[in-house]
Amino acid sequence: MLDRYAAAHPEDAATAQRIRALVEDHADCFDRTCRPGHITGAAWVTTRDGRQALLVHHRKLGKWLQPGGHADGDSDVAAVALREAQEETGLADLSLLGGAEALPLDLDVHVIPARHDAAGNLIDDAHEHHDVRYLVVAPTAAPPVVSDESHDVRWFAIEQLSSVTQEESVLRLARKAANLLRAD
Protein backbone atom coordinates (compact mmCIF):
# COMPACT_ATOMS: atom_id res chain seq x y z
CA MET A 1 0.00 0.00 0.00
CA LEU A 2 2.81 2.43 0.84
CA ASP A 3 4.52 1.66 -2.49
CA ARG A 4 1.30 2.32 -4.42
CA TYR A 5 0.68 5.52 -2.45
CA ALA A 6 4.24 6.83 -3.00
CA ALA A 7 3.97 6.09 -6.73
CA ALA A 8 0.69 8.00 -6.95
CA HIS A 9 1.89 10.85 -4.67
CA PRO A 10 5.64 11.36 -5.21
CA GLU A 11 5.43 14.61 -3.23
CA ASP A 12 4.71 12.45 -0.13
CA ALA A 13 7.46 9.88 -0.72
CA ALA A 14 9.44 10.98 2.35
CA THR A 15 6.44 10.52 4.63
CA ALA A 16 5.68 7.13 3.08
CA GLN A 17 9.31 6.11 3.66
CA ARG A 18 9.17 7.27 7.28
CA ILE A 19 6.08 5.13 7.90
CA ARG A 20 7.69 2.20 6.05
CA ALA A 21 10.74 2.45 8.33
CA LEU A 22 8.51 2.23 11.41
CA VAL A 23 6.72 -0.83 10.00
CA GLU A 24 9.95 -2.56 9.00
CA ASP A 25 11.75 -1.83 12.29
CA HIS A 26 8.90 -2.53 14.73
CA ALA A 27 6.84 -5.72 14.56
CA ASP A 28 4.47 -4.12 17.10
CA CYS A 29 3.91 -0.96 15.00
CA PHE A 30 0.11 -1.44 15.06
CA ASP A 31 0.03 -1.43 18.89
CA ARG A 32 -0.34 1.84 20.78
CA THR A 33 2.54 0.84 23.08
CA CYS A 34 5.05 0.89 20.19
CA ARG A 35 7.64 3.65 20.47
CA PRO A 36 8.79 6.00 19.08
CA GLY A 37 5.28 5.85 17.62
CA HIS A 38 2.66 3.67 16.06
CA ILE A 39 0.31 3.35 13.09
CA THR A 40 -3.06 5.06 13.38
CA GLY A 41 -5.98 5.23 10.95
CA ALA A 42 -8.06 8.30 10.20
CA ALA A 43 -10.94 9.28 7.96
CA TRP A 44 -11.73 12.45 6.07
CA VAL A 45 -15.53 12.17 6.20
CA THR A 46 -17.34 14.12 3.53
CA THR A 47 -20.67 14.24 1.78
CA ARG A 48 -20.80 12.67 -1.68
CA ASP A 49 -20.63 16.12 -3.31
CA GLY A 50 -17.62 17.06 -1.17
CA ARG A 51 -19.22 20.29 0.06
CA GLN A 52 -19.22 19.36 3.74
CA ALA A 53 -16.76 17.64 6.04
CA LEU A 54 -17.35 16.08 9.44
CA LEU A 55 -14.90 17.04 12.20
CA VAL A 56 -14.66 16.06 15.84
CA HIS A 57 -13.50 18.41 18.58
CA HIS A 58 -10.92 16.10 20.15
CA ARG A 59 -11.29 15.87 23.93
CA LYS A 60 -7.59 15.27 24.72
CA LEU A 61 -6.09 17.65 22.14
CA GLY A 62 -8.76 20.39 22.25
CA LYS A 63 -8.79 20.81 18.45
CA TRP A 64 -11.14 20.22 15.53
CA LEU A 65 -9.71 17.20 13.71
CA GLN A 66 -10.74 14.37 11.42
CA PRO A 67 -11.99 11.20 13.17
CA GLY A 68 -9.33 8.57 13.71
CA GLY A 69 -7.56 6.44 16.23
CA HIS A 70 -5.35 3.57 17.22
CA ALA A 71 -5.09 0.38 15.21
CA ASP A 72 -4.85 -1.70 18.40
CA GLY A 73 -3.11 -4.53 16.59
CA ASP A 74 -5.21 -4.40 13.39
CA SER A 75 -2.99 -4.12 10.30
CA ASP A 76 -5.99 -3.31 8.04
CA VAL A 77 -5.61 0.44 8.44
CA ALA A 78 -8.48 1.21 6.03
CA ALA A 79 -10.82 -0.82 8.25
CA VAL A 80 -9.42 0.99 11.30
CA ALA A 81 -10.15 4.38 9.69
CA LEU A 82 -13.72 3.38 8.82
CA ARG A 83 -14.35 1.88 12.28
CA GLU A 84 -13.00 4.97 14.03
CA ALA A 85 -15.13 7.26 11.86
CA GLN A 86 -18.25 5.28 12.72
CA GLU A 87 -17.44 5.13 16.43
CA GLU A 88 -16.53 8.81 16.75
CA THR A 89 -19.46 10.17 14.73
CA GLY A 90 -22.26 7.70 15.43
CA LEU A 91 -22.86 7.33 11.68
CA ALA A 92 -23.14 3.71 10.55
CA ASP A 93 -23.73 4.26 6.82
CA LEU A 94 -20.25 5.51 5.96
CA SER A 95 -18.24 3.96 3.13
CA LEU A 96 -14.61 3.97 2.12
CA LEU A 97 -14.19 5.65 -1.26
CA GLY A 98 -12.53 3.05 -3.45
CA GLY A 99 -13.56 0.12 -1.26
CA ALA A 100 -11.16 -2.39 0.25
CA GLU A 101 -8.41 -1.60 -2.29
CA ALA A 102 -8.57 2.16 -1.70
CA LEU A 103 -5.34 4.09 -1.54
CA PRO A 104 -4.99 6.43 1.42
CA LEU A 105 -6.00 10.02 0.78
CA ASP A 106 -3.04 11.25 2.83
CA LEU A 107 -0.20 10.21 5.12
CA ASP A 108 0.93 12.25 8.10
CA VAL A 109 3.40 11.76 10.93
CA HIS A 110 2.90 14.03 13.91
CA VAL A 111 3.85 14.18 17.58
CA ILE A 112 1.24 13.61 20.26
CA PRO A 113 2.30 15.61 23.32
CA ALA A 114 2.84 13.98 26.70
CA ARG A 115 -0.17 14.01 29.02
CA HIS A 116 -0.06 14.48 32.78
CA ASP A 117 -2.72 14.18 35.47
CA ALA A 118 -3.68 17.07 37.77
CA ALA A 119 -0.86 16.13 40.18
CA GLY A 120 1.71 16.29 37.38
CA ASN A 121 2.19 12.54 37.02
CA LEU A 122 2.88 11.27 33.52
CA ILE A 123 -0.15 9.52 32.00
CA ASP A 124 1.21 9.06 28.48
CA ASP A 125 4.62 10.00 27.07
CA ALA A 126 5.07 12.07 23.93
CA HIS A 127 5.07 9.83 20.86
CA GLU A 128 4.39 9.86 17.13
CA HIS A 129 1.25 8.93 15.27
CA HIS A 130 2.01 7.57 11.82
CA ASP A 131 -1.43 8.41 10.47
CA VAL A 132 -2.82 6.69 7.37
CA ARG A 133 -5.87 8.69 6.24
CA TYR A 134 -8.67 7.56 3.96
CA LEU A 135 -11.52 9.31 2.18
CA VAL A 136 -14.84 8.22 3.69
CA VAL A 137 -18.18 9.23 2.22
CA ALA A 138 -21.52 9.74 3.96
CA PRO A 139 -24.65 9.47 1.79
CA THR A 140 -26.05 12.59 3.49
CA ALA A 141 -25.00 15.07 6.14
CA ALA A 142 -26.93 13.09 8.77
CA PRO A 143 -26.81 14.40 12.33
CA PRO A 144 -23.74 12.94 14.09
CA VAL A 145 -23.54 11.75 17.70
CA VAL A 146 -20.80 12.92 20.05
CA SER A 147 -18.63 10.11 21.46
CA ASP A 148 -16.77 10.02 24.78
CA GLU A 149 -13.58 10.95 22.90
CA SER A 150 -14.87 14.33 21.74
CA HIS A 151 -16.37 17.54 23.03
CA ASP A 152 -18.38 17.95 19.83
CA VAL A 153 -18.82 16.56 16.34
CA ARG A 154 -20.16 18.71 13.55
CA TRP A 155 -20.53 19.08 9.80
CA PHE A 156 -18.76 22.10 8.32
CA ALA A 157 -19.02 23.62 4.87
CA ILE A 158 -15.61 23.29 3.24
CA GLU A 159 -15.38 27.08 3.02
CA GLN A 160 -15.72 27.28 6.85
CA LEU A 161 -12.80 25.02 7.70
CA SER A 162 -10.15 27.71 7.96
CA SER A 163 -12.33 29.54 10.49
CA VAL A 164 -12.38 26.53 12.87
CA THR A 165 -8.90 25.09 12.36
CA GLN A 166 -5.48 26.22 11.28
CA GLU A 167 -4.14 22.65 11.35
CA GLU A 168 -2.33 22.32 8.02
CA SER A 169 -2.85 18.56 7.96
CA VAL A 170 -6.65 19.03 8.21
CA LEU A 171 -6.69 21.73 5.53
CA ARG A 172 -4.48 19.51 3.34
CA LEU A 173 -7.04 16.70 3.68
CA ALA A 174 -9.75 19.08 2.47
CA ARG A 175 -7.68 20.09 -0.56
CA LYS A 176 -6.78 16.51 -1.46
CA ALA A 177 -10.39 15.33 -1.10
CA ALA A 178 -11.66 18.20 -3.26
CA ASN A 179 -9.16 17.31 -6.00
CA LEU A 180 -10.03 13.63 -5.85
CA LEU A 181 -13.80 14.19 -5.84
CA ARG A 182 -13.51 16.65 -8.74
CA ALA A 183 -11.64 14.02 -10.76
CA ASP A 184 -14.16 11.31 -9.85
Image (spheres, rainbow, N blue to C red):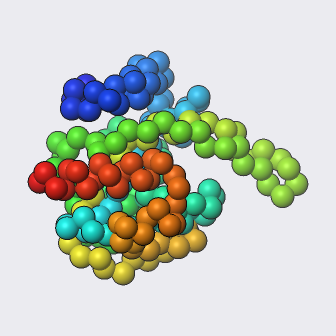
Q: Is residue 86 visible?
A: no
State left or right for residue 41 relative to residue 182.
right
> Viewer-proximal residue, 23 or 133?
133
Q: How many marks?
A: 0
Q: In the drawing, does residue 47 fall left or right of residue 124?
A: left
Question: Relative to residue 144, is residue 49 depicted above or below?
Answer: above
Left or right: residue 183 compared with residue 141? left
Position of 61 relative to 32 (above/below): below
Q: Residue at x 79, y 54 (%)?
A: 117
Q: Position of residue 175 (x, y in %)?
A: 32, 52
For residue 87, side relative to residue 129 (left or right): left
Query: In which quadrant will I find the C terminus?
Result: bottom left
Q: Measuring 44% from the left and 53% from the top, which residue is drawn there?
A: 170
Decide if residue 51 is in sight here.
yes
Residue at 59% of width from left, 28% of height from top? 36
- Farthest bottom residue? 143
Q: Position of residue 110 (x, y in %)?
A: 53, 39
Of all residues, the one furthest to the right in this rendering is 119
- Is residue 20 or residue 109 the one in the foreground? 109
x then y, percent, for residue 85: 37, 61
Q: Quadrant of the N terminus?
A: top left
Looking at the image, the residue that sits furthest to the left is 184
Q: Could you tell me which residue is drawn at 40 percent across and 24 percent down?
A: 14
- Residue 177's x, y, as percent? 27, 53
Compared with 113, 43 (above or below) is below
